[in-house]
Amino acid sequence: MLQVALATAAQLPDLDEDGAALLEALDAEGVQAAPVVWDSGADWAAYDLVVVRSTWDYDRRREQFLAWAASVPRLANPADVLAWNTDKTYLQALASAGVPVVETTWLVPGDVFTPPAGPYVVKPTVSAGARDTAAYDGGADATAHVQRLLAAGRPVMVQPYLPQVDVLGETSVLCFEGEVSHAASKSALLQVGAGVRNDIDSRAFVTPAEPTRAQVRSRQGCPGCGGAAAALRPGGPGARSGGPAAARAGAHRAAAVPAARRRGDGALCCGLAPPSGPVVARWVRTATVNTSEAPSTCSATSTGGTPEKYCQ
């Protein structure tokens, strides 16, 4: 029987609430799987396969996490994909490849922050679960937030706040072998003026959803949409862009059992030609990100019946 370790975080030693269903589904496929904390010092060579599942503390110790990933003998999630996809500066590569992305101002230590007009979001380029992230409609608190992050050596991204998310939320649409399987909706995590909160449980905002026709059209027929099982698809940073954020598999409540019964590799698909470059192309074949009617994460909106895509 195949022995699989599902890498997880210390705060989720038994995986999340999807874990039991996932383990049951894998067992039905003849796979003996067990959750193992990624930084526990386990003997990873003892497993036939190691899968990044719920490593949601990676952003606090990214370099350590990436060093661990590079050291695991049989890791299902390519280490270079994890390195690329755990820093939201990948949006620059997507934009260069012609993928529409939300307008973003990038700041590194030493830069001067000028607050933009209108509501906007400040977040570090390496983050998960809306940690160290806030929405503002003014300058003083946002400036202090940016300065704290930059002083800690953390690059920052600033994006306009998209009010559509307050109404429509985000919808993650998962497809396997070119067909839409299921979807989940996540309501807005941030409130303008609420300040920085690091106690947000993003899973509490997720519910099963029926994808719209526009969302389905944006996923069908896109290159490389042979999906990975949620069981064997990255449940942490390798799963989504932002997080493609986005990533963010454990967040989809209904995903574990049906997806675990499928085989293959997940694919980034915005309904556009995949970005070029060896790392990007490899990520396109192995990661899954969100699509939504609101232009947030990897989003699809319908204007006059034509889906428009954005990545955030």
Image (cartoon, rainbow, N blue to C red):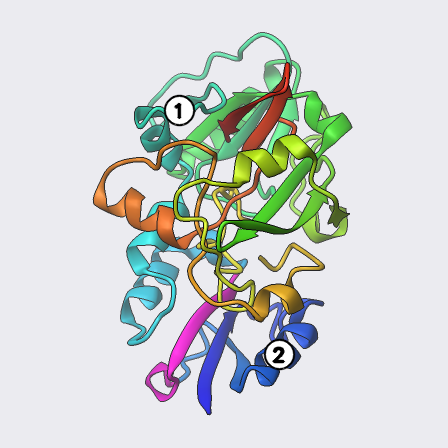
Q: Secondary structure at mark 1?
A: strand
Q: Could you tell me how far apart the alpha carbons at marks 1 and 2 are, in whole angstroms?
A: 41 Å
Residue at (30, 50) in percent of width and height: 282
User: Residue 52, relative to residue 199: is it above or below?
Assistant: below
Q: Nearer the viewer, residue 305 or 117?
A: 305
Q: Nearer the viewer, residue 70 or 192?
A: 70
User: Residue 64, relative to residue 20: is it above or below?
Assistant: above
Which amino acid type is shown beneath numbered disc 1? Trp
Which amino acid type is shown beneath numbered disc 2? Leu
Q: Which residue is mark 1?
A: 106
Can residue 81 be seen here? yes
Q: Secondary structure at mark 2?
A: helix
Residue 26 in the image: state x and y as whole percent. 57, 79
Does 191 lie within the magenta span? no
Q: Which residue is mark 2?
A: 23
Residue 196 in the image: state x and y as whole percent. 65, 35
Q: Nearer the viewer, residue 57 or 182?
A: 182
Q: Nearer the viewer, mark 1 or mark 2?
A: 2
Residue at (28, 76) in percent of width and height: 73
User: Residue 102, relative to residue 13: is it above or below?
Assistant: above
Question: Relative to 56, is 169 on the left or the right?
Answer: right
The quarter holding residue 25 reads bottom right
